Amino acid sequence: MNRIINTTNAPAPIGPYSQAVIANGFLFLSGQVAINPESGVVIQSSIAEETHQVMRNIKAVLLEASYGFEDVVKTTIFLSDMALFAEVNEIYGSFFHKNFPARETVAVKGLPKGVNVEISMTAYKA
């Protein structure tokens, strides 16, 4: 049976999807963008602040599901421009300490709310 994960510590979905779903030990996190969950404001002051907010949102969903970054097995990073890669990669990497997950990073034509970065993850616990 699937379990839906929802927390007020991360932005509410802006469409017909859940923040995350647990199925057979896997946690599938929907893509997170830099929306401050308290104010609903999109953070775009810098790519660093935008990335930090995305990662804080992901952390909130992971915690609500009783998972952590050490349980993440796969991530996908969507960027509005590959020129942002180095800065996003540095901040993203600071949330992982060993046994890094598999990952792909792609540049896309556009992202929701005009943001520059969106990150989705899959985690697993036996």
Image: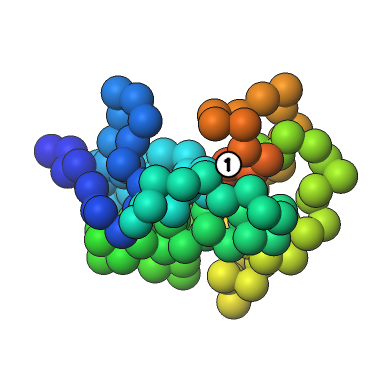
Q: Secondary structure at mark 1?
A: strand
Which quadrant is home to the C terminus?
A: bottom left
Up the image or down, 88 lies above or below 95; here it is above
Q: Position of residue 58 (x, y in %)?
A: 44, 56
Whether residue 37 is visible here, answered yes or no, is yes
Outermost residue, left direction? 1
20 vs 88, nearest the viewer: 88
Residue placed at 63% from the left, 48% from the top? 44
Residue placed at 13% from the left, 38% from the top? 1
Circle 1 Cα neighbour tier, 10 Å, few/some/many (<14 / 14–19 / ≥20): many
For mark 1, what is the residue? 118
User: Is 80 on the left-hand or right-hand side of 121?
Assistant: right
Up the image or down, 106 lies above or below 103; here it is above
Residue placed at 25% from the left, 54% from the top? 8
User: Is 71 on the left-hand or right-hand side of 100?
Assistant: left
Residue placed at 74% from the left, 65% from the top? 90
Whether residue 99 is visible here, answered yes or no, is no
Question: Given the image, on which type of amino acid does mark 1 rest?
Answer: Glu
